Image: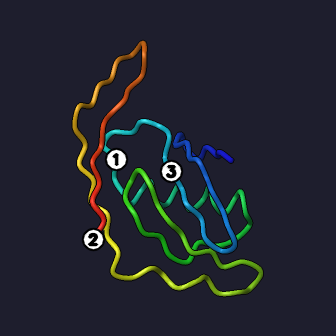
Amino acid sequence: MTREVEGSRFLLRVKDRMAEVTRTSFEFPARFGPISERAQKAVHLETGCEPEWVTGDPAMMVMGLSCNGEPAPPEPRNRSISCEIFDAVYSERFGGSAAVECTQW
């Protein structure tokens, strides 16, 4: 499912009390704080659940949801993903693409 909030577009995947949110709109500068606030609003509007925690980066976030008075699942620990962008291309006519290399540690 997709949702737009205050000009940001998100692809939402929800299972049980966890949400994975991918930002699909171009934003510059892509700052985590404002984007995560809009992503949390999108999840709340779509599910009716309150995000209790959010982790990730401006492009992709994972959220723990409190639904119907139940607490959110615990936040994942000791897992980090670091991604580097290279070969990015953008044009007004065709949009953009980028190659990324990610490492989980």
Q: Position of residue 34 (x, y in %)?
A: 42, 56
> Residue at left 49%, top 60%?
37
Q: How is the image coloured?
A: rainbow
Classify mark 1: residues with Cα within 10 Å, few (<14), some (14-19) or many (20+): few
Mark toward the start of the polypeptide (3 vs 1): 3
The residue pinned by badge 1 equals: 30
Q: Position of residue 103 (x, y in %)?
A: 27, 60
Q: CA distance from mark 3 to mark 1?
A: 13 Å
Classify mark 2: residues with Cα within 10 Å, few (<14), some (14-19) or many (20+): few
- In this orientation, which residue lies closer to the viewer: 62 or 67? 62
The image quarter containing residue 98 is: top left
> Residue at left 71%, top 86%?
70
Is 82 placed above or below 88 here? Answer: below
Is 15 placed above or below 22 here? Answer: below
Q: Please name the amino acid that badge 1 sits on.
A: Ala
Seen from this angle, which residue lies furthest right?
A: 68
Is 50 placed above or below 24 here? Answer: below
Q: Position of residue 89 (x, y in %)?
A: 29, 25
- In this orientation, which residue lies closer to the viewer: 29 or 84? 84
Q: Is residue 30 left or right of residue 42?
A: left
> Residue at left 39%, top 82%?
77
Say what secondary structure mark 1 lies in: loop
Q: Please name the amino acid that badge 2 sits on.
A: Trp
Q: CA distance from mark 2 to mark 1?
A: 23 Å
The residue pinned by badge 3 equals: 22
Say what secondary structure mark 3 lies in: strand
The residue pinned by badge 2 equals: 105
Mark toward the start of the polypeptide (2 vs 1): 1
